[in-house]
Amino acid sequence: MTDRARFIAHAEPELRALIAALPLVPGAHILAAGAPDPRLSTWLLEHLTHGGRVVSVGGRMAIAEEPPPDPGADRSLVAELRALPFPPATFDLVWLLRTRDWLPTPLLVARSLAASLRPGGCLTATSTNLVPSMIFAWDEELERALRRAWREYRRDADRFRTGGSASPRRLVGLLREIPLDAVKVHTIPIDRIAPLAPATEAYLLETVFRGRWGHRLRPYLSRTHWDVLRRLTDPASPDYALTRPDFHLIETLTVVTGTVIA
């Protein structure tokens, strides 16, 4: 399972609530941009009426699948987001999950996505990176050290990327630069407490502890902080954080929307 798939499984209640609140008109055509996941398409289809449909695209070029026989079914494609294989003004809504898919040319991608919208159509982008992405119920000093280490790691990892405007913190500026009208922001918390659901435990262990942190952060932490982190994130350790009765996770999901001027 990919990191994205684990996140979607972990955040299913919040993502379903966001989808239910989307401004969908009868018969809406939706573009789900970013690496597609069949669950997102299914949840979107649940809220469509009068022949609406969902088309999913990723960020790399590939041959499109044949259209399914059911006109309301999802059609999964993988396309270059900067040169979408659709005529302009095709969709009523573009929904993008996790904005790092825009790298390394966020403005070009944003304009390409906006050009695919009909007048009055809505571009909705979500990110988990606009505010500190995670707060755990563990030592506050370790929390600060982890945030600092993650920032330093991302700085070094992004050093060779182009297009510094790709930071998710620039989402509002990007949507206004296109330009889109009526730009709005909404942030919701993702709260989880012990005992954790299997999907959340898998997301935290595999995607966060082993994938996002793991040995990536070791050069950026003191020996003391690294030893503490290793004990807290090792399932074989008696100090394993995810089995602590006081474990509490707070994560945020920010949604930025804008509409094409009619």
Image (cartoon, rainbow, N blue to C red):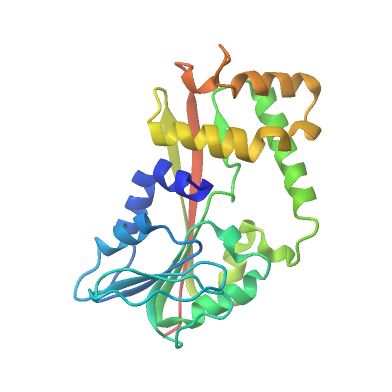
- x and y percentages locating residue 238 in the rendered image: 56, 11
Quarter of image, res 160:
bottom right
Work out whether 126 lies above or below 73: above
Percent x, y of residue 34: 51, 64
Q: In the image, is 129 to the left or to the right of 165?
A: left
Which residue occupies the extreme top position in the image? 238
Front position in the image: 172 or 204: 204
Q: Residue furthest left?
A: 50
* Observer able to see residue 179: no
Q: Residue at x 76, y 31 (%)?
A: 218
Q: Is residue 40 left or right of residue 126?
A: left
- Name which quarter of the figure residue 173 lies in: bottom right
- Count of marks, rendered view: 0
Image x and y of residue 129, in percent: 59, 49
- Rendering quarter of residue 43: bottom left
Q: Is residue 200 above or below residue 167?
A: above
Can you give x and y, in whole percent of width and height, for residue 242 in the image?
49, 23
Image height of 229 relative to 258, above or below: above
Residue 75 shows in this picture: yes
Q: Nearer the viewer, residue 1 or 171?
A: 1
- The residue lying furthest to the bottom in this view is 87
Residue at the (49%, 70%) spot, across then down: 78
Q: Quadrant of the C terminus?
A: bottom left
Would you place residue 207 above or below residue 39 in this image? above
Horizontally, residue 142 falls left or right of residue 186, namely right
Identify the residue at horizontal 21%, vertical 76% (top origin).
Answer: 51
